[in-house]
Amino acid sequence: MRSVSLSLLVCCLLALGARANAQEQGPQTSPPPAAAGVQQAPASPASPVSSTATPPSAPPAAAAPATPAVPATPAAAPNAAAPAAPAAPATPSAPAAPIIVPVGTRLPLVLHNAITTRNAHPGDPVYLETLFPIVQNDKILIPAGTYVQGEILEAKRPGKVKGRGELRLRLTSMILPNGYTVNLASVPSNAGTGGNESVDNEGTVHGDTSKGADAGTVIEDTGIGTAIGGIAGRSAEGAGIGAAAGAVAGLVTVLLTRGPELELPRGTTLDVVLDRELRLDPSKINFTDPGKASTLAGPPNREPQRSTIPF
């Protein structure tokens, strides 16, 4: 009876162990299908001894793409010079503003070539020179001795009865001592000729009249005629006849000859006032010497003389 109870106890213990083992293994899952083209390894025969089943391993994860290796930068030699950086393109600088000689600036000039209405023609050149430097803000812009060139626009001879000689001039260019040439469009405003010439607002130079000289010619011829008549007739009547004849001769002389020619002798001074601004290139204006004008003798004072040529 005691052996039977022991046998029952052993059987109960075995049954309980098998049941616990089944609960630990859980439900069996079927293995995943084999990939195409891959031969599945044969299953190993079951072991006769009951043991705990090992769950199948998870499929291998897809391999990440390999990152390309960065080539190592070679170490610079200790004494190797670093490559020079490319030079940046130069930015063109803005041109400097021109120097402005303002309107109303006076240029005193001296004439190098004599001019007279007796033989002057339109287009004939006129040569002058500055007498005094032009300075602005302590900077010499136009030194003395700067050459100025112009031309005759019109030349008019005096009339036989009335009218005066006339010259109309225009200054066209200016040549500085360093050869820099600028355009100069201006006309004279004053003239020192040694006579009684005058300049109007348009820059025309007018010659002197000969009214006093004409009256003197008539008086002189009248006196000569009076003396000749008195000597010839030895009477007052003869003197009167001679005076009348002399007056007529003097008047005829005045009517048949021209008035005094307009003359601008060498050394005549002319003043020019700028009627428009003068623009100078600052790169060409670098004078440190005020300059010096040529020494020219001025024209002597003279009285107007009527031409003795009746044409």
Image: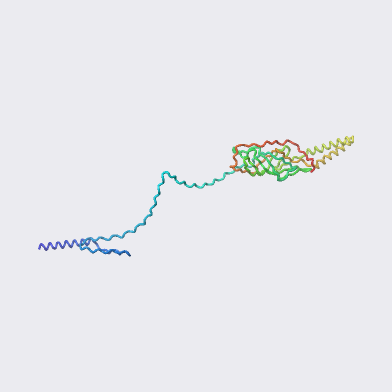
Q: Nearer the viewer, residue 223 or 86?
A: 86
Q: Quadrant of residue 67?
A: bottom left
Residue 168: x, y in percent? Answer: 71, 44
Q: Nearer the viewer, residue 87 or 33?
A: 87
**Label tally:** 0
Residue that extends furthest to the left in the rendered view of this protein: 1
Residue 175: x, y in percent? Answer: 64, 42
Q: Quadrant of residue 99?
A: top right
Instruction: Report the side of 33 relative to 262 (left or right).
Output: left
Instruction: Report the side of 143 relative to 225 (left or right).
Output: left
Residue 195: x, y in percent? Answer: 73, 37
Q: Nearer the viewer, residue 136 or 90?
A: 90
Q: Quadrant of residue 233?
A: top right
Up the image or down, 80 lies above or below 55; here it is above
Colour pattern: rainbow
Q: Quadrant of the C terminus?
A: top right
Q: Quadrant of the N terminus?
A: bottom left
Up the image or down, 25 lies above or below 142; here it is below
Instruction: Report the side of 13 relative to 203 (left or right).
Output: left
Residue 3: x, y in percent? Answer: 11, 62
Instruction: Report the side of 217 relative to 189 (left or right).
Output: right
